[in-house]
Image (cartoon, grey):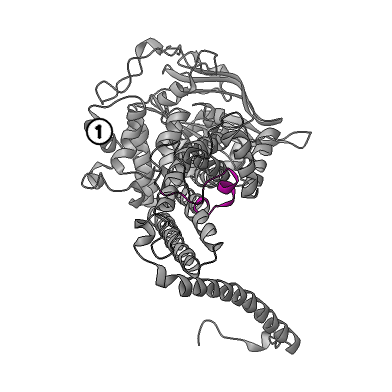
Amino acid sequence: MVSMESPDLGHGDPVRSAPPADIVLTREMQAESVPGAPEPDTRQVVFDIRGLDVHYGPVLAVAEVDLAVAAREITALIGPSGCGKSTFLRCLNRMNDLIPGARVSGSVLYHGLELYGPQIDPVEVRRRIGMVFQKPNPFPKSIYDNVAFGPRVNGQRRGLDDLVEHALARAALWDEVKDKLKKSALALSGGQQQRLCIARALAVEPDVVLMDEPCSALDPIASSRIEDLMVELKRDYTIVIVTHNMQQAARVSDRTAFFTAEIRESGARVGVLVEYDQTETIFTSPSDPRTEGYITGRFG
Amino acid sequence: MSLLEADAAAVTPLPRQSTGKRLADRAFWVVLFVSFGVAVVGLVALLWYVFDTGWPAFGGRLWRRFPSLDPEIAGARSAVFGTIWVLGITAALAVPIGIGAAVYLEEFASHDRWYTRWIALNIQNLAGVPSIVYGILGLAFIARGPLGLGPTVLTGGMILALLVLPIVIIASREAIRAVPPSIRDGSLALGATRLQTVRRQLLPAAIPGIATGVILALSRAIGEAAPLIMIGAFTYVPFNPTRLDSKFTVLPIQIFDWIGRPQEGFTQLAAAACILLLIILLFMNALAIWLRNRYQQRW
C-alpha cells in the first residue's frame, strides 16, 4: 500500500519509542536551506521542505517555502492572519488533500521520503502525523470512545483500556476524567476538550503532532496547561505549532518560523516564509526588518 | 458626585411615533392574524367534521374486521395491514437508497461540478412532482411493462419509495451537512479513511436528523391513495397481505371507496378510518419531534 514501511503501529507497547529506525534518515540540518543561517544542528530532520507552493484553484496561497523541522523540538509558525501558516501546516499531514482544488507542489521530505510521492497513502501519513485543531473538536461520543477511535479505525481491538489510560495520562487529563470515561466528551470544559483531542492524537502513537492554534479558543489558564503539556511532550514527539500568540511561541518553541503575506504585482496576497531561526534569535535579533516589525508589534 | 451623570440636554429628544405609522402597524398585525385565523379555522372545522361524523363508528372493529357490504359489520383490517406492509416495503427501499444517495452527494460528489448541482436541483424538483405522476410511472414500468409485477404490495411499496425518496435524500443531506467539518477533519486526521469517517462519525451524528426525515417521508406515504389506485390496487380486499406479491389495499383507498358508497353507515366508517389515519400520523409526527429533541446534537 505504501512505501512508508514501519513497525506495526498500535499493537505494541503503548509507550512510544523513537521513530521507526528504518525510516529515519539522519542528516545534518542544512544551514543554507534555512533563511537566516541558524546554528548548525546535528539533530534529526523530520521534515525537510523545499520550494513548497500551495495553490487553491488558480490562486497561489503559499509560495516557495524552504524549512526543515528537527525531531523532538517544538517548531512554532507565527505571522499575521492570512499569511498561509495554517495552510502550510496542513501540507505536512496532507490534510490539504481534502480541500477541493488545493494543490501542493515542491518537495516535502518526511524522514527522507517524499510525502507527496505517488506511492504514499495519505491515510497512512495522517496516522503517523497527528493533528490538533484550533477549536477543540471532540467527537459526540464518550471520552473513552474519543480516545479509542484512532486505534479502532487502525484495526486495534485489544488492549484499548491501557492505551486509552496511557494516552489520557500523557495528555495530563487522566486524573480529571478517570471516573467518567463513559460520559460524553462534550460535557468537558474547553481546555479539557483540547487536552482530550491531544490524547486522541497521541493514542495512535504518531511521530509528529501538528497543532493549529491549539490555544486560541482557550482561556489563559487552560492555555498554560497546554503549553506545559507541549514542553512535556517534545521529549517524545516532534511538534509543529501554529500560533497567533507570540509570547506562546517564545515560551515553548525551540525554533520559530515567521510567515507573512506579500502583495504581488498582480495584487494577489501570497504567504511567504520570511525568516526561520532559533526562537531566541527570532525574538532578540531577527535579521529581517519585517520580522522585527511583527514581533515588536508594529504591525500584524 | 457620581462618576457618570445623565445629561438629557446632550441628546435630541426621541420623536413620537406618528399616527399613520401606528395605524399601518396595526393594520399589518390584523392582516397577519386573519391569515393565521383562516388556517386554524379551516383545520379545526375539518377535524370537527371528521370526529363528529366518525366517532360513533370508531372502534376496534376498524382493525379487527375485514371489509363487508354491510356497513354494520365492515372494518378495515385488510387496509390497516396493507398500509403496514406497503410502508414497511417503502421504508426498506427508500431508507438505504436515500441515505446512500445523500452520502454520495454530500461526501463524494465534487460540489463544483455542474452535473452534481444539476442532480441536486432535480432532486428538489422531484420532491414536488404530483404523486399521480409516480403512479403512471409505476403502472408503466413496475406493475406492467419491464417488471410486470402486477398490483401487488411490492409494487405499491416501490412506487411510494420512489415518491418519498427525494424527501429522504434531502433530509439526510441536511442532517449530514449539519455535522461540523471539524468532526470530519478530526476523524481523518487520526488516520481514518473516508469510509470509516462516514460510517463511524458522520452517520451516527446525523442519525437523528435522518430518522426525523424518514418518519416525515413515511407520513407523506401513508396518506397517498392516487398512485396506488393508478397501479390498480383493489378497493375490496377481504384478506391480509401475506407475501410480497399479495393483492392489497391501504387506508386512504379504503376511505376513498367507502366515501363513494350511498349508505350513511359507510360515510361514518370512512370518517372513522380518517380518525385512525390521523391518529397514526399524529403518532408518527410526535415520534419525529421526540427524536429530534431527544438526540439533537448541540455542537
Question: Considering the image in quadrants, where does the N terminus of chain A appear?
Answer: top left
Q: Nearer the viewer, residue B43 or B69?
A: B69
Q: Is residue A204 above or below residue A251?
A: above
Question: Considering the image in quadrants, where does the C terminus of chain A appear?
Answer: top right
* Residue A113 x, y percent position in the rendering: 49, 13
Kindly identify the amino acid type of the residue bearing the numbered disc 1.
His
Q: Is residue B140 above or below residue A91?
A: below
Q: Is residue A278 left or right of residue A35?
A: left
Within the magenta stretch, is there residue A213?
no
In which image quadrant can residue B198 be found? top left
User: Which residue position is annotated with label 1?
Assistant: A166
Residue shown at 63%/36% (left/top)? Answer: B140
Q: Nearer the viewer, residue B49 or A192?
A: B49
Q: Secondary structure at mark 1?
A: helix
Q: Is residue A275 above or below residue B152?
A: above
**Residue at the front extreme, as displayed:** B70
Report the label total.
1
Q: Is residue B32 left or right of residue A232?
A: right
